[in-house]
Image (spheres, rainbow, N blue to C red):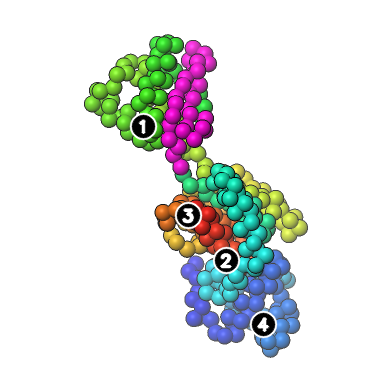
Amino acid sequence: MSTTPISELNDRARDVFRLVVENYLGTGQPVGSRTISKIAALSLSPASIRNVMQDLEELGLLAAPHTSAGRMPTETGLRLFVDGMMQAAQPSIEERRAIEAGISTVGEGGGPIEEALSAATVALSGLSACAGIVMVPKREPLLRQFGFVPLNAAQALAVLVGQDGSVENRVIELPQGVTMSMLTEAANFMSARFAGLTLGQAGEVLRRELEAEQSALQGAARELVERGIAIWSRDADDRAVLIVRGQANLIDDGTVADLERVRQLLEQLEGKQEIARLLESALAGSATKIFIGSENKLFSLSGSSVIAAPYRGGDGQVVGVVGVIGPTRLNYARVIPMVDFTAQTLSRLMR
């Protein structure tokens, strides 16, 4: 169903619709005509309001969960409200200070950028009462040293040491006929040939040398090097570069009657790869993106919303995304500017 343009709603319909949505987002409960009629500025009787709400329901903007219940906005209605009617409220001084405090403390301490990103998600999660998420910039460390430690006749532990002191271990299957001397030969070759390069660069150098038959390695030792580079490169590509904090915020008094939805959402948060792919769509833009419920297949079952904003590195290029995941009834007017401010704060830290 396409979204009804705001211009097609008369003043009365717009006022009623706005009040229903704002009340619903504030309470999480369907809104009745009597509640709306008590707002003096509207000057409409409950009967008139019911008629307007019925019209809005026929347009697909409102829905009644039960026959005798009030109305609540549909996902289509929420999209119309967010895009065309919402009055965003800028973060308060206290909220801005809370976001800046955690991030700047890490930044001034010279700690890993992941610590600042984690602090950003914790602050954002606490202020929004949602789960905070941040996509970590993909960084390829420069390589320093390689090693192979035999585990048994068929497997070895491949050890990679980066120039930043990081150490990564992977179990690889050994080619037929590999001896201890071949393990040493392959490790020495890789350390000498690939030191100072990224994994991507090392793989490209190895490919060129093998194609030109210029590599000093032959047979099983050559295959061992190929397997070592391949497993590290594949793992780097597949690794979820996502930090999620504050999942407990998704379980509150309002979710007791909707535990199945919460369970599905928590399961989706475990699949960080899928969420990372969703957030990658925000990398291409310069503005905050909002995904409401089934607008994205990942959250179609749990009925959740995602608000995500890109942040930039020292060169001004977008390097990651920060945001929140919460129920579709979250306070968009408050949370959207909060996410945007967090992204701006991270961008300043990266400079």
Camera-side mark, 3 or 2: 3
Q: CA distance from mark 3 to mark 1?
A: 29 Å
Between discs 2 and 4, the one toward the N terminus: 4
How far from the left and from the top, in percent, is residue 151? 53, 16
Q: Residue at x 67, y 65 (%)?
A: 94
User: Of residues 290 and 261, which is closer to you in this image?
Assistant: 290
Q: Residue at x 43, y 35 (%)?
A: 142
User: Of residues 320 and 28, which is closer to you in this image?
Assistant: 320
Between discs 3 and 2, the one toward the N terminus: 2
Camera-side mark, 4 or 3: 3
> Judging from the image, what secondary structure is the residue with disc 1 in?
helix
Q: Which residue is mark 1?
A: 202
Are the residues tagged 2 and 4 within 8 Å (C-beta)? no
Q: Which residue is mark 3?
A: 351
Q: Which residue is mark 4?
A: 49
Camera-side mark, 4 or 1: 1
> Judging from the image, what secondary structure is the residue with disc 3 in?
loop
How far from the left and from the top, in percent, is residue 104? 59, 54
Q: Which residue is mark 2?
A: 337
Q: Residue at x 54, y 68 (%)?
A: 79
> Does 333 sit above or below residue 183?
below
> Judging from the image, what secondary structure is the residue with disc 4 in?
helix
What is the span of residues highlighted in magenta in the rendered image?
139-167
